[in-house]
Image (tube, grey):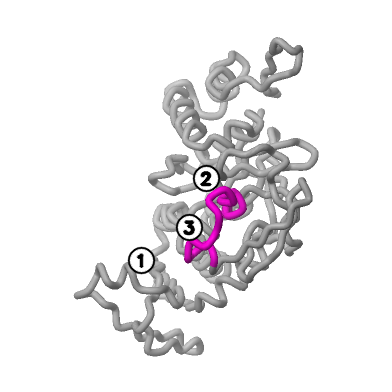
Amino acid sequence: MAVQNSLAKNSGNKPQKAGITAFLNSMAVIANIDQALGKDNRQRFITGVISAVNTNETLKECTNQSILSGALLGESLKLSPSPQLGHYYLVPFNDKNKGKVAQFQLGYKGYIQLAIRSGQYKKINVIAVKEGELEYFDPLNEEIKINLMIDKWDEREAAPTIGYYAMFELINGFRKAIYWSKKQMMVHADKFSPAFSANATTIKTKYGEKKKVSFADFEAGNYDPADAWMYSSFWYKNFDEMAYKTMLRQLISKWGIMSIEMQSAIDADMAVINEDGSNDYVEDDDSVIDMEPADQEEEDVPVEPTHEQEAPQDAAAVLFGNK
C-alpha cells in the first residue's frame, strides 16, 4: 500500500508537511504499520519514532515517508531509535531532488547487538587507545600490547586518543583483530564523509561567504559559535563513536560471520530507504547534514569539498516493504 506524506494548506495556500504525529496516526499509515509489524507493536513503534523526531529539530523537516521507512527498517532489525541506546540514527540529509530526507545510519552499538544476536561471536570489542598505552601492534600475527591505565581511569578518559583497536572471536575459535591510528581514521573520515574535513578547508556558503573549517579548530573550540552549523557531522561531534563503527564495519564485513539481519543492516547503512524497500545511497552532495545542526535557514548549508562517498557493496533489497 502506498503511503504518501499528508499535506495541509496554510493561510498562504502553500503546501505544508503534516507533523510526524498526525502522519503516523493517519489511517493509511496505521494500516501499513499494522501490516508490517502487527497491531500489538503499533503504539510502541509510533511512540519511539515520535520521540526520536522530537529530539532533532532538523529531522522534523525531513519527509515523513523517509522517516517512516528508516524506522521500519530499524524495527525489522529489532533495533531501537533511542539516541540513548545508539543502535541506529535517522540522520537529516539534503537531497537535491526530494528535499530533506532521513538517512538510516547504523550505530556501533547496533553492530554489536546484531553480532551478539547471531550467536556466532564469543567475544567482540572495540576500544580507543590512549597516548602512552600502546607498546606495539603486529599486523601479521594480529598481536597487540597495550598498557591500559586501569588504575587511573579518569586520567585515561581525559588523555588524547592515538588509535583504535577492534577484535572478535567466534565460538569456533576463529579470531581477528585490527588496529588503526587516529591519523588513519581521520584520512578515512575525510575521504568518505562530505561534511568532514581533517585539515583546514575553506568552504563557501550559498550566500557566497567563505568560511574556514578544520577538525583541529573544532577540538580546540577555536570557532565562532555562530558557525557551529558547519561542524554538524557525526565525525566532528562523535568522532570516537564513528571510529568504533568504522572499525567494527571493517572487521565484521571482511572477516566476520554475517547473519541475514547483519547483511541487511550493512546494505542499508548510510542510505535513504525508499517506500518500496529499495535503498538510495548518499552521493557526493553540497548539502549533507550528518547530524543535528543548529537552527539555520536552508541557504546556510555549506557547499562541502568533493569527496568519494562510501557505498556498501552487494546491496540487496531490504527485507520489508509493502506487500
Between disc 1 and disc 2, the foreground one is 2
| Residue 100 shows in this picture | yes
| Residue 257 shows in this picture | no
- Tell me the magenta residue range: 217-233
Picture quarter with the C terminus? top right
Q: What residue type is labelled 1?
A: Lys
In the picture, residue 154 is in which quadrant?
A: bottom left
Closest to the observer, 30 or 310: 310
Q: x%, y% of residue 187?
A: 62, 73
Relative placement, left or right, of 276 versus 156 is: right
Q: Is the magenta stretch mostly helix, strand or loop?
A: helix
Relative placement, left or right, of 285 versus 128 is: right
Which residue is under mark 2?
89
Relative placement, left or right, of 8 versus 234 is: right
Which residue is under mark 1?
122
Residue 238 bears which disc, if any? Answer: 3
Q: x%, y% of residue 178?
A: 48, 77
Looking at the image, tell me whether mark 1 or mark 3 is earlier in sequence order: 1
Q: What residue type is labelled 3?
A: Asn
Asked if the residue at tag 2 contacts the one at tag 1, i.e. Cβ–Cβ closer than 8 Å, the answer is no
